[in-house]
Every structure is written in C-alpha cells, then in structure tokens.
Image: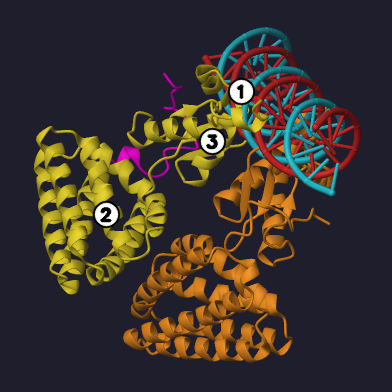
Chain colours: A yellow, B orange, C red, D cyan
Amino acid sequence: MPKITDITLQRSGPAAREIYSALRHRIMLAELMPGTAISEVQLSEQLGVSRTPVREVFRRLADEGLLRIVPQVGTFVAPIQLRAVYDSQFVRETLECRTIVLATANMNVRAADELQDLLTLQKRAIRDNDLERFFDADDRMHTYLIGLGGYPAIWDLIQGVKAQLDRVRYLSLESGDWLNRIFEQHEVIAARVIEADAAGAEAAMREHLQSVFLTIERLAVNKPELFEGHLGQQSSAKSTP
Amino acid sequence: MPKITDITLQRSGPAAREIYSALRHRIMLAELMPGTAISEVQLSEQLGVSRTPVREVFRRLADEGLLRIVPQVGTFVAPIQLRAVYDSQFVRETLECRTIVLATANMNVRAADELQDLLTLQKRAIRDNDLERFFDADDRMHTYLIGLGGYPAIWDLIQGVKAQLDRVRYLSLESGDWLNRIFEQHEVIAARVIEADAAGAEAAMREHLQSVFLTIERLAVNKPELFEGHLGQQSSAKSTP
DNA sequence: ACTTGCTTACTAGTATACAAGAAGAGATGA
DNA sequence: TCATCTCTTCTTGTATACTAGTAAGCAAGT
C-alpha cells in the first residue's frame, strides 16, 4: 500500500504563477496600454479564482514597476517612465559590457557552436517575420553570453530592469529592416567573442545596446502620450476588455 | 453635522509596510538566523494583525531572497548563498565603479561639502563604536556618489542585491580596526572625486569594495554553517522567540 | 443655472474560514 | 526491538466576508 506522499503527482499547481506570467505578458506586449485600470475583482472572476492570488500578482507587478496601485482607488498599468528607461539602459550596458569581456576569456569550441546556433534561430525568426520569436532568441543569446562570463544569475537582474525597455521595444514594432540590423550586430559580437577579442567584443556590445536604445528614444519622442505622468487623473482609463 | 470623512484623522496606517521594515531589519541584523522557521500565524498573532499583511510581507522578502517559502511546510530565513554573495559583489563593483567616473565629471563645491559632512558622520560613528550608524553613513555616502553620477535610481537596485552582502557584514561583527580602514578608504575616494580624478576615484572605489568583500569571504570560510544548503531538513530550525 | 451636500457604487486593505498537504508522535503488529 | 501504519497537528494556499476611503452621480437649495 503506497504512502500518502507517493500520490502527490498531479498538483493543482500554483495558480498565482500562471496569472503572473499571463498578466505580465499582456502588459509587456502592450495588450494592456499604460493607464488602463485593472480591477482585482473583475480579473479574479474572469480567471475563476479568488482575489487573493490575483492580489499577490498585483503586488509583485507593482514592485517591478509594471503596475501602479493606488489605495482605495484602483490599480492601473504603469506609464512608461522615460527616467526608468534611461536607468535600465545604463545598468544593462554597464553590466553586459563587463560580462562580455569575461566571456571572451572563457571561450571554447562548444560555446562557438552554441553562438552559431543562436544566430541561426534569429535568422529564421526574421525570415518568418516573427517578432516575438526573434526577441526570444535575442534574449537567449544575451543570456548565454552572460553565463559564459561566469555570472549567469546576472541575467535575472537584467531581466528585471529590462522590463521597461522591452515594453517600448514591443510598442515600437520594429520592422524587418531593424531586425536585420540587430542581427548583423549580433553577428559581429559573436565573431569578436569567438576570436577572443575582448576590446572588440565590448565595443560591439556597447554599440549594439546603444543603437537599440536609440530606437526606443525615437519612439519616446514620436508617441509621448505613452510616457510619464498619464496617471493621477485616470480620465482616459478604460476597464479591461 | 460633520461628515463621516471628517472623523478619519487617526488612520491606522499601512500595517504591511511597518511589518516589512521590521522583519527585514531583524533578518539583516541576523537577529533571525538563517534556517529559523517563521510562522505566518505566530507572527500575525504576535503583531496583532491578520495573516494577510504578514503573508504579503513574506512574499516580498522571499522575492528578495531573504525568506524561503516551502508550500505546506513552512517559511524559513534563507541561508546565505555564497553564489549570490559573489554575484552581488560583481554587480555592485561594476555599477559603482562606472558611476563614480561619471560623478567626478559632475563635481562642484556643494558636493565637496556634502562629502566632507558624510565623512564626519562616519568618524563620529566609529568614535562611538556604533556599527549600525556607521553602516548607515556608509550607505549614505555611496548613495550620494551614485546620485552625483546622474543615476540616483541605481542605488535602489544596488540596495536590492546588497542585501546578501550586508547580512554577512553584520554577522562578521567588523571591529573598530576594520571600520577605521574602511573610513580611510572612504577618505581616499572622496579626495579623488573632489579633485575630479576619474581614474583614481575608480581605482579607489574598486579597491574599497573588494577589500570589504574579502572580509566577507573570510567569514564564509570561518563560519560555513551559515551558508549554502542548510535548509530542506530544518532539523536545527527554531521558532521565533 | 449653479453650487452644495449627501448617497451610492466601487476600490484596496484587512480579517477570518476552509482546504490540502507534509511531518512527526504514537499505536499496533511482527 | 524495530518497522509500519494511522492520526493529530502543524504549515501554506485559497476563498470569502467585512472595513474604510475615494469619487462620481444625484438631488435639493440658492
């Protein structure tokens, strides 16, 4: 006769985790625009759970700067603060430019193959014009390079600050042209790392990150309504559809 | 006849925030040792509130890596992972060495006065042998230098990763000797920044942060029982006193 | 027509109740 | 004496009820 502990295979699963991923995804892809009001009750009913797990998710997203909780008033998708975007860029550039120097020191054949594979993934995503898949492969390449530098956990930290950057990236709807340019930069970075050219790799990485940042800055000028203080008056706030 | 809203002067205040600060403080100062079990019910009764706010605090501290929540088993003060300490050191050194270069470019008379004042605070804390006050003044100096670099928000990020470092610092019970050495390093850093010597300031900062790290590494060797995987079996776990 | 005051509907914060699982104590059997 | 099973008691996860505060809508008075 099996012990009770043996049956614990089909766990109901942490509902909160699912909700977190889903909601975060919707915010990142701007399916939920900045300023949009989100009700705990409404969302919990929509998902068929109670307020408690939804509430925990709200708290976490608020800590990440993606939601803004106003006591006794409501919860809103946070506006994109240009200040935070600049800070994110600074942190990311500083850390990645340092780690890639370390990465060149740990170079080997297997790593070269891995980088080649990641480049191939990106090329295919561009061919299929699949923005989300390209960003995913992009992330994986940066992740791998950071791990190669010897501090894989740094990526989690970058992931956190990168959230504000990525929100704008998705909004900017970068065209195939830009994707190709990003891909070419990735190729240069990979080449420099593979040939263990520390200074060259660092320069290539810095140029790459800064050029991505420029497209973001451009959007900030073209669509200023998405940024800064478009909260406080939630005049244009709409409920979740 | 007064409105109902007029009587609402004595607000109870956000209980969760208070609990967060208090509990975090107790963990940081190692009043609660790694591995210690903390019960939601027990703490909520002790504080005279319900489980809900306590639960939110637990979640946040778990996200920061200070608590470890094991479903259906318990919540424990997280062990200090040497890996995380190394990562923290790397991030902090990388970011602060970059920001201090920027700080030298923004130097002015008022900033020099401020740095002098902060050094005075530290000297007095050492004289009074007040470790906590010294660490506080220490933090304020680093905060100011980062702000002077033009990215004040970066400090919040460093604060987050620094948590793991500070836990060890408090545990190491640095003596007056060490405090004096740290103070001297601060003096050198301030001097280099004031005379706008970017390279010198960066070097001084790097040496400073690495020397602090060395004392931490030393403790990790001397008291290995506080580190790594001392959870899972909470054999030595005690309840909150 | 406009202002003032109150009612109402909605919000997040908190408290409490219930459910599910894990671990240890103790009984029961060999 | 030792192993095994069961039950009690703990834990966190979830659901629901209640409190307090905000803001907008409505109605009465000017």
Q: Nearer the viewer, mark 2 or mark 3?
A: 2
Magenta residue check for B82: no
Location of the N terminus of chain A (image quadrant): top right
Q: Is B152 placed above or below D4 here?
A: below
Foreground of the two, B216 or A205: B216
Mark 3 or mark 1, which is nearer the start of the sequence? Answer: 1
Question: Label for residue A50?
Answer: 1
Classify mark 1: residues with Cα within 10 Å, few (<14), some (14-19) or many (20+): some
Quarter of the image where one finds residue B231: bottom right
Q: Which residues are magenta?
A: A223-241
Q: Is residue B20 above or below residue B44?
A: below
Which residue is at a point 61% across and 31% down the rendered structure image? A6
**Circle 3 is placed at which residue position?**
A58
Q: Is circle 1 on the same chain as circle 3?
A: yes
**Residue A228 falls inside the magenta stretch:** yes
Query: What chain is tagged by disc 3?
Result: A
Q: How much space separates mark 1 and mark 3, taking CA atoms?
A: 13 Å
In the rendered structure, find residue A142 and report the number of the disc placed on it: 2
Give the alpha-carbon distance from disc 1 to disc 2, as whole Å.
Answer: 38 Å
Find numbered disc 1 in the image and state the secondary structure of the residue it sits on.
loop
On the rendered structure, is B35 left or right of A213? Answer: right
Q: Earlier in the sequence, mark 1 or mark 2?
A: 1
